[in-house]
Image (cartoon, helix red, strand yellow):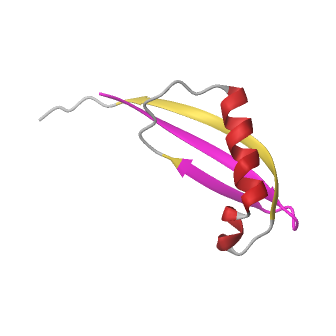
C-alpha cells in the first residue's frame, strides 16, 4: 500500500515555521498547484487561527511511503 503526505511549511511574521500536513494525497500534485493553493490559504488568513500571522510559503514536500502489511 502506498500513501502520500504533502507537508507545507509556512513562515510567520516572527520567522517561525508553521507546518501543515495533508495525509493520504491521492491526486497528482504539482509545484504550481501547491503554490496557488498555499497562496489562497495565506490570503484567506485561515492559518492565522493557529495564533501566528503566516506571510509566505517556505517549502513543500510530497512524501511517498510504501507500507507492507505482514499480518
Residue 68 shown in magenta: no
Query: Left of 70 or right of it: where is 50?
Result: right
What's drawn in magenta, residue-wise? 1-21
Question: x, y (%) of residue 16?
Answer: 80, 63
Question: x, y (%) of residue 67?
Answer: 31, 31
Residue at screen point 26% across, 28% down: 68
Q: Please name whichever residue, 27 or 62, is drawn nearer the observer in this view of the structure.
A: 27
Main secondary structure found in the magenta portion: strand
Query: Left of 54 or right of it: where is 28?
Result: left
Query: Left of 66 or right of it: where is 7?
Result: right
Residue 6 shown in magenta: yes
Residue at screen point 58% across, 27% down: 29
Question: x, y (%) of residue 24?
Answer: 41, 39
Asked which quadrant contains residue 2, the reply is top left
Question: x, y (%) of residue 22?
Answer: 51, 46
Residue at screen point 80% across, 56% down: 11
Instruction: Check the image and name the residue furthest to the bottom.
Output: 51
Amino acid at each position: 500500500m502506498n500513501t502520500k503526505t504533502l507537508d507545507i511549511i509556512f513562515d510567520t511574521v516572527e520567522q517561525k515555521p508553521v507546518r501543515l500536513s495533508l495525509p493520504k494525497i491521492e491526486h497528482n500534485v504539482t509545484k504550481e498547484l501547491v503554490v496557488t493553493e498555499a497562496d489562497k490559504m495565506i490570503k484567506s488568513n485561515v492559518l492565522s487561527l493557529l495564533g501566528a500571522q503566516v506571510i509566505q510559503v517556505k517549502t513543500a514536500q510530497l512524501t511517498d511511503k510504501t507500507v507492507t502489511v505482514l499480518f
